[in-house]
Amino acid sequence: MDKDFVNWRWKPEKCELPRFNPHKFLQLVGGRKLGFVGDSVARNHMESLLCLLSQAEVPMDTYKDSEDRFRTWYFPLSNFTLMTFWSKFLVKSEERMVNNTNTGSFDLYFDEVDEKWASKLPGLDYVIISDAHWFFRRNYLHNQGKLIGCVYCNEPNITELGLNYSLRMSFRAALKYINNCKGCKDMVTLVRTFSPAHFENGAWDTGGGCNRTSPQRQKANEELENTRFELELRRLQVEELNRANKEGEGEGKRFRALDITRAMLMRPDGHPGEFWGNRWMKGYNDCVHWCMPGPIDAWNDFLLAVLQKEVESIT
């Protein structure tokens, strides 16, 4: 109902962050391929980039799978390819079924990445890895053919390892796979840090909503900072990125952070909320994804700045 969320803009404390320039971005990535790997928030990010780039050049929609999970667009004038690869957990996963009915619980296998995205990596110049929101459920964790624990299962004789552990090990497996990928020479991997949700007065399925119409004040955000679980998830993602960088030294692989967590903690006003128009899930608020145009476009301000710095470092 309000439109103010399109006017607010995050500003760093000690520098100016230029607005996204689609012409400059396409010039920077001309002749290259960029892929997004992750869940629907990764798709949300990709769609923001697609919309922004379409202001400069109309892309060709060249591929869509039957479930609309894997997509490819091609910008012919710039010879730039933009792709998105769906993955809930980055690693191999299987949903548990009871009487042929979905349970919403998954078995995760940390020694096997999800081949659906991993097989697409060779030939990419840039890949943006992100994931987290599917981990907030009962999951069973496996490694080397053994059940090693669970998340939110509260079952006898199974160790509760926790959300943080499962997220860390999934990112570790994904980044290790990239480091060992023979067809990924000189590829730049960006880890997009955790995108916070802003449910209040309940979770997504217990009546929670997000009705704020202005950003969180910086002082209030700082007071909460030491207790925010989102920053703990961001921290472990950055730790795994640094681990991958160290392990990949001398191999030509580069891992960088696309660090959006703190900035987005301040934007509870930027979600679709009750106005997301989903015909399958009526009555639920969407306080996870982001309106477009809106705060998520800032992620591409960050993306352009990071890629430009990366290109300048090797020229």
Image: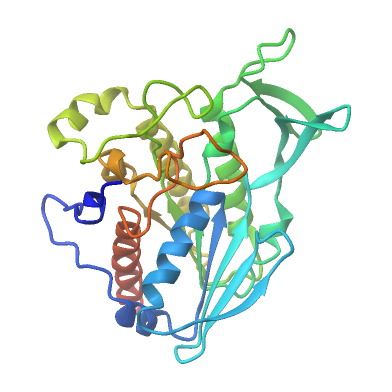
Residue 271 or residue 236, whichever sits in front:
271
Q: Quadrant of the C terminus?
A: bottom left
Q: In the rendered image of this protein, does residue 300 appear above or below residue 159?
A: below
Q: Which image quadrant is residue 107 in? A: top right
Work out whether residue 124 or residue 207 is closer to the camera in this orientation and state it: 207
* Residue at x 33% of width, y 77% of height: 22
Q: Where is residue 156 in the image (x, y as percent from the top left)?
A: 73, 7
Query: Can residue 215 be seen at all in this image of the molecule?
Result: yes
Q: Which residue is drawn at 32% across and 82% down?
A: 23
Q: Whole-percent x and y of residue 230?
A: 38, 33
Q: In this view, does 183 lie to the left or right of 246?
A: right
Above or below for 12 versus 203? below
Residue at horizontal 22 percent and vertical 67 percent from the top? 19
Identify the image quadrant of residue 69: bottom right
Instruction: Please report the residue visible at 45 percent of the width from the left and 53 percent of the height from the top.
Output: 191
Q: Which colour scheme is used?
A: rainbow
Of residue 48 and residue 16, the one placed in the foreground of this image is 48
Give the vertical position of 310 relative to 197 (above or below): below
Q: Name, please, the residue furthest toward the top.
A: 156
